[in-house]
Structure formats: C-alpha cells, structure tokens
C-alpha cells in the first residue's frame, strides 16, 4: 500500500565534502555574473566570492544537492514528484548532513479486472405526474404578474419592505419579493402571510433575543399562467404535442443523469477495489476552483466541498491511468461520431473550425475522456434499475 500514498518522507544524507563541491560550483556561477570591486567580472577569487555571498551560496548549494539526490531517487523508484520538496528536519553528523524531505508524488494506480465489476444503472422512470409537474414549472417561469386588491393566497407574489427592529430602533429597510409557496417558503412566514393584504404588517421573532423581523406588505400580485396552448407556442411545440415533447425531454434528461451516475458508480467501485491517496496540492487546487465557482471563500474550509474535490482528483487520475494502460486513442472519426451524438448539424465543419482556431487539442482531449468512459461502461457488468 506504500506505493499508493501520495505524500512521502525520505531521509537524504549528503556528505560535507559533497556540499563543498556544490558550494564551489555555485560560487563559480555567481562569480561569472557579479562584479566585486577591484576585479573584472568573472575574475574575482572564489574565496572572495564566498566571503561576499556565503549565506546565499550555502543555501543554494544545499538546494541543488537535494534536488539532484531526490531526482536520482525518483528515477530509481519511478516517481513523478509534484511541486517542490519541503525540508522538515535537519541533523548534522561528523562528516555529513541528514535531511528529511516531505514531498508529493503521483501515487501508483491499479486498474482492477473491469470485467468483474458489477454496478447498477439507476434510471428514473418518467410518470404522468412528472410531466404535469414540469408543465406547471414551465408555466410558472412564463407567468405574468397582475396586481390584485385582495388577501394573499398560495401561489401569489408579495412585494414588501423588510427590516429588523430592536429596542425601538429599526435597521435599514430592504425590498423583499416573496413567492408564497408552501414548498419553498419558511413555514412561519408562510403561515403568517396567508390572508394578509397590502398595508398589513407581519412581525416575527428575530434571531437574537428582543429582536423582531418586520415585513410591511406593499403589493399583492397574482400570477397569471399561460394556457397549455400558449405554453406550447412559447416553447415552439405543436399544441397537441406539448405533453409528448415534455415527456421526451424528461426521458432524455433522465438518461443523461443515469449515464453520469453510472460513470461515478464505476469510478467509486474501482476506488473501492484499488484505493489510493489523492495528492493534497491537486485536491486543494480543485477545491479553490469549486469554491470560486460557487462564490464561496476558499479559505473557509467546507468539508463537503473538500470531499468532492478529492473525488474529482481521484476520478481524473483513474481515467488518465485507464487511457494509458489500455492505449485508448481518439481519432477524427471518433470526434465526428460524438459531435453527431450531440446533434451537431455539421460535425466535419465544426472540426475544421476547431483546428483553425487552435481548439483541436482541447476538443480531442474532451472526447478522449468520453471514449475512456465508454470503454468502462462497455467493459463492466451493468444492471439497469428503474427508480
């Protein structure tokens, strides 16, 4: 299991005689570049150069010596080192120095016998209720709002002013747009707002003791939903095919979702059978990218997001190992096939344009990964399961 670790520590012993040779080499390099008063560039004695730049020469010599030693060790053990090794301990002996280095390597990744892996492909069945729910959702997205002079009902939109009141003092007022829907709104606010009218005030307990949350209702808006025929026209469907088209889209979405979950299930099973550690620096980089995409502060550790980043690194390393081990290659014919599957009208022209814009390699890498996933799905044992 040692070879599956990504963080290593190694003790490196360097004799003082070796260090001196490195110091002489560094000093000669410096002497060729710097000017010391009384000497032409490159002509100053090494002893004088050491006197002027002794501390730098010593640290640079140690750095070079350790670089050479760790590179030699990496070659012997077939390591690919990530980043720069860190000195975590140092001790001095009579004739040598001992350094303990900590560094990251790409771990050894083993692809188990894929033909023995069994996974379930969970496919979501689309029901009539799913179709109606999606139609209602689309109607809500395309609804218009009409101001009404009545009490608030389920499905209305309420425009209000919100502020915090404590000890007789009010915070700055803010505008609030409240969609009155039981499944989406805080239960306490939902129950309090039903039946109210424009001009009414809602007062709820605040988060702190003695604090009140105040909502002043300014306007009640009723949502006017398009009819089935109007929605079909907005979506560009024949009126008599609205439900059929919506069902087809939901089925396609469910199939795509099933493929993604299947791919993840295969990767997780590979990792269960042949676990390895993800390099922390790669995990941290992915974590920063995820946090930035989600508008989160990367310095505030989110454990769930960190676990996601770790899985993404593990997944990508497995796929890269699979591509290398199975000699998976991408051809232009493969790319055109995938483009056709994605409903690209003229895949040949698309490929030609990608080459012209210098985007071919990016496109090829994208579909090389897709081909690797296809290889996995065709090789493991997949059992469909409708949920």
Image: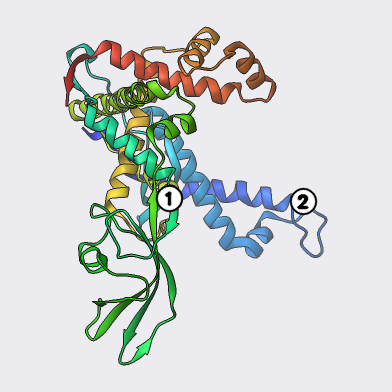
CA gap between label 1 and label 2 equals: 47 Å
Total residue callouts: 2
Against 85, is 271 above or below?
Answer: above
Image quadrant where residue 172 sits:
bottom left
For image coordinates 30% across by 38% down, the residue present is: 311
Q: Is residue 3 visible?
A: no
Q: Position of residue 12 (x, y in %)?
A: 37, 45
Seen from the viewer's position, the closer of residues 271 and 105 is 271
Left or right of residue 37, residue 128 in this image: left
Q: Indicate whether 268 appears above or below 48.
A: above
Secondary structure beneath label 2: loop
Q: Is residue 67 left or right of residue 37?
A: left
Residue at horizontal 38 percent and vertical 21 percent from the top: 240
Q: Where does residue 180 sit, x and y in percent of width and height?
A: 30, 58
Q: Quadrant of residue 71?
A: top left
In the rendered structure, the answer to whether residue 300 lies left or right of residue 127 reads: right
Specify which label sits upstream in the sequence, 1 or 2: 2
Position of residue 257 measured from the top left corner of the image (x, y, whole percent):
31, 28
- The mark lying in front, picked from 1 and 2, is 1
Mark 1 crowd level (few <14, some 14–19, many ≥20, 10 Å Cα): many
- Give whichever of 22, 307 is nearer the camera: 307
Q: Residues within 10 Å of mark 2 (few under 14, many from 20)?
A: some
**Residue that badge 1 annotates:** 288
Q: Quadrant of residue 313?
A: top left
Disc 2: which residue: 42
Residue drawn at the location 33% of the way across and 92% of the way down: 168
Q: Quadrant of the C terminus?
A: top left
Q: Is residue 370 visible in the rendered structure shown here? A: yes
Q: Is residue 261 above or below residue 335?
A: below
Which residue corresponds to the image point at 23% horizontal and 69% vertical from the top-left? 192
């Amino acid at each position: 299991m040692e070879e599956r670790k990504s963080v290593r520590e190694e003790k490196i012993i360097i004799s003082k005689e070796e260090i001196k040779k490195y110091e002489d080499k560094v000093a000669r390099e410096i002497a060729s570049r710097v000017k010391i008063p009384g000497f032409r560039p490159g002509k100053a004695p090494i002893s004088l150069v050491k006197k002027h730049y002794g501390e730098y020469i010593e640290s640079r010599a140690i750095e070079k010596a350790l670089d050479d030693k760790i590179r030699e060790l990496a070659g012997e053990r077939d390591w690919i080192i990530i980043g720069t090794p860190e000195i975590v301990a140092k001790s001095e002996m009579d004739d040598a120095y001992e350094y303990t280095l900590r560094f990251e390597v790409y771990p050894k990744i083993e692809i188990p016998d894929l033909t023995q892996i069994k996974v379930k492909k969970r496919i979501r069945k689309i029901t009539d209720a799913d179709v109606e729910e999606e139609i209602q959702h689309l109607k809500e997205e395309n609804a218009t709002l009409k101001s009404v002079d009545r009490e608030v009902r389920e499905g209305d939109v309420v425009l209000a002013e919100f502020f915090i009141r404590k000890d007789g003092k009010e915070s700055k007022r803010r505008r609030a747009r409240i969609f009155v829907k039981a499944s989406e709104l805080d239960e306490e606010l939902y129950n309090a707002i039903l039946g109210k009218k424009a001009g009414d005030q809602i007062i709820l307990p605040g988060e702190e003791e003695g604090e009140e949350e105040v909502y002043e209702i300014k306007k009640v808006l009723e949502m006017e939903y398009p009819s089935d025929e109007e929605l079909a026209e907005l979506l560009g469907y024949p009126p008599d095919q609205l439900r059929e088209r919506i069902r087809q889209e939901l089925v396609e979405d469910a199939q795509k979702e099933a493929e993604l979950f299947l791919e993840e299930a295969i990767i997780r099973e590979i990792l269960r059978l042949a676990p390895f550690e993800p390099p922390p620096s790669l995990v941290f980089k992915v974590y920063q990218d995820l946090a930035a995409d989600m508008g989160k502060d990367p310095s505030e550790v989110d454990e769930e997001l960190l676990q996601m980043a770790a899985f993404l690194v593990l997944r990508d390393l497995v796929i890269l190992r699979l591509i290398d081990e199975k000699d998976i290659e991408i051809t232009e014919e493969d790319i055109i096939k995938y483009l056709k599957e994605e409903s690209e009208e003229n895949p040949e022209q698309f490929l030609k344009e990608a080459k012209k814009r210098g985007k071919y390699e990016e496109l090829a890498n994208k579909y090389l990964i897709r081909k690797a996933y296809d290889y996995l799905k065709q090789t493991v044992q997949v059992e469909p399961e409708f949920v």
